[in-house]
Amino acid sequence: MQDNNRERANEINEYYLINKYKNNIKVDSVAEDKEIYEQIINEMNPSSNNSKIIDAYKFFYEKIKSSSLDKDQLFEAIKNLYVVTITLDRHHDNAQEIFETINSTGKALSKADLIRNFVLMNLNVNEQNILYDNIWLHIERILSDPLFSNNIHDKFFRHYLTLKLKKNIKQDNIYEEFKLFYDQYALQNSLTSFELAKSISKDLYNYVKIYSQIVLGKYNDEKINNIFKSLGKLELTVAYPFFMKILNKFQNNIISRDEAIEMINLSISYILRRYICKIPSNALIPVFINATKIDDKNYCTAFKAHLKLLTKDSRFPNDKEFYKMFIESDIYERQTYCRYILSMLNNWNSKNIIITDKMTIEHILPQGSLNSEWITDLGGSLERAKEIQEKYVHRIGNLTLTNYNSELSNNSFSFKLHHNKGILNTHIELNNEFFTPDMTLWNDETIQQRSKKLTSKALKIWPYPNISDNELSLYIKEKPTLSVQNVVNWNETNNNIFEYIDQKVLSIANDIKCNIQNTYITYIINKKLVVGIKFRKQGVNIYLDTSINDIEEADVEKFYDVSSKGKVIFPSQVRAYVETPSEFDSILKYIENSYNEKRKLI
């Protein structure tokens, strides 16, 4: 452009790009892109191609190059763009509120952008630059690793807030919950605005480093890192906040390396055993949230007690239950779990770790059509062979790993065993410890034998918490028991729904207290009612001090307006009736809202 129209080029440079009187760039980019931006403006070769500034420059360059518009038309179009500058008084204007109002009319920022702006916006420019250059720039660089999946910024802040607030954080509420956390932190610490922002920023930086090392398998302790690497694509995100807490304690020498490893392994074992035993996963969130609440000098012992004392749908399956289900379950059902299980069975206690990422899962007894040799091995009739195939084909005893799945295919057992790329020649522990050259038969009996052998190994890889009765007794708390004699309308149905409600409500936050009376139960925070419960013969009435106008239209029919009926034992405006956990789940968000509103009043 400059060669063809020097005057126009100079006009553009002086109008938009360069302030010739101050000898600097007119538009100040963020530190991450500033050097690249200046190199482009000064017509230098960029020092890096890994920048969105480069991508944007190339995009507009190609668009302008292929455009039918001439330079004058383009320049006139650019002149029609407006830049609005809003000058605020830091002492009287709420910068963040103004920013949120303006931003709501355009493209929504990520939760991470909102949080960063919230932390920095009420500081002066110098303080902002200090925190951004020394902390936030590094946070953003860590979370910009191309190995991360989409929305990693929001995922991190969700896990961080779950750890800090000790309650389940919904994706849509991340920003609001962060502001709540920020306010709580400010109340607990007498700091200046800058010191407060600096303290929280440093804490975020500490945890984002830990988080990235967990997710990417790049932890700086080899033995701990091998655990995370072994998980592969098995994302145990429900445990991430707890893992972050464990590793922070380890890095600060509060717990030992062995204790950290034991707690991480027990967490994985808990999730894996429950998956094998087909226990619904909805209890996992409150279990791990409650684990972050543990505050005990014997942290590892307290965590083991926490796991062992879980009951019913939250339980840690014992060895007997796990042994039976590991043998009988369809392990192949979810291939991420299946691959992880086979890899661990192969590499456990092995000096030669085999990378199994590129290996495929092989069914020794094929899952496809059965040839005559298979029919003979499986009882002689097609009907009997199919019956055995259906029952055993996806069990652990029939599964292995191979690099040559397509070559082995549906061939006979003898072919799969002795082929030069077959079972005996893969040289992996998973095969070496059971298969021998003299084997001639593969049927339901041999599958069962191998299943039992692998299951005995699985009990060691994914153990049950090892804690003595004396140690456990220190953590057994006597819970108040409710019976027909002291609680009106108490029965077995109410017992089941109460246990579910109690777990859910207490997992919202660790400062909620349960108060049990003869005719009702309340959950309170600093003497303020979060939710009240009164038992009916077949269910539970839920009372909230929430206006019926604040109930979403889709949920209004679930509530009764009791605001005009006077005080019903405790202050309330609406009442809902539930009999099942799913009915309670549908109104849980209003209890969470009630907690947040009461928390603001403290």
Image (tube, rainbow, N blue to C red):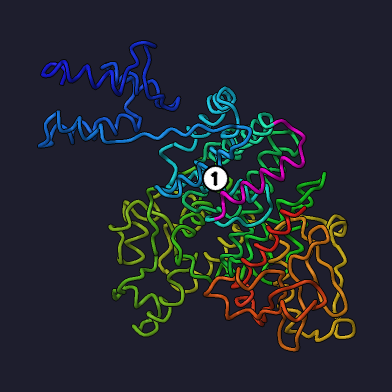
Question: Residue 494, position in %: x, y?
Answer: 74, 82
Q: Is residue 222 visible?
A: no
Residue 32, by quadrant, is top left
**Residue furthest toward the right?**
485
Pick whichever, 119 or 153, lies toward us. 119
Residue 453, by quadrant, is bottom right
Q: Which residue is denoted by mark 1 in the rendering?
A: 156
Question: Residue 300, position in %: x, y?
Answer: 76, 48
Q: Is residue 489 above or below residue 363?
A: below
Question: Residue 8, position in %: x, y?
Answer: 17, 20
In the picture, measured across the screen, residue 109 lies left or right of residue 451, that is left
Pick whichever, 535 or 551, lies toward us. 551
Question: Residue 266, position in %: x, y?
Answer: 66, 53
Magenta-highlighted stretch: main secondary structure? Answer: helix
* Residue lying at 44% horizontally and 58% vertically, measured from the top left: 400
* Residue lying at 70% horizontally and 60% vertically, measured from the top left: 595
Q: Give the quarter of the figure containing the N terminus.
A: top left
Mark 1, secondary structure of its residue: helix
Asked whether 54 falls inside the magenta stretch, the response is no
The magenta-colored residue range is 173-192
User: What amino acid type should be assigned to the residue bearing mark 1?
Assistant: Phe
Asked whether 190 falls inside the magenta stretch, the response is yes
Q: Is residue 440 above or below residue 68?
A: below
Q: Is residue 255 above or below residue 138?
A: below
In the picture, measured across the screen, residue 461 lies left or right of residue 230, that is right
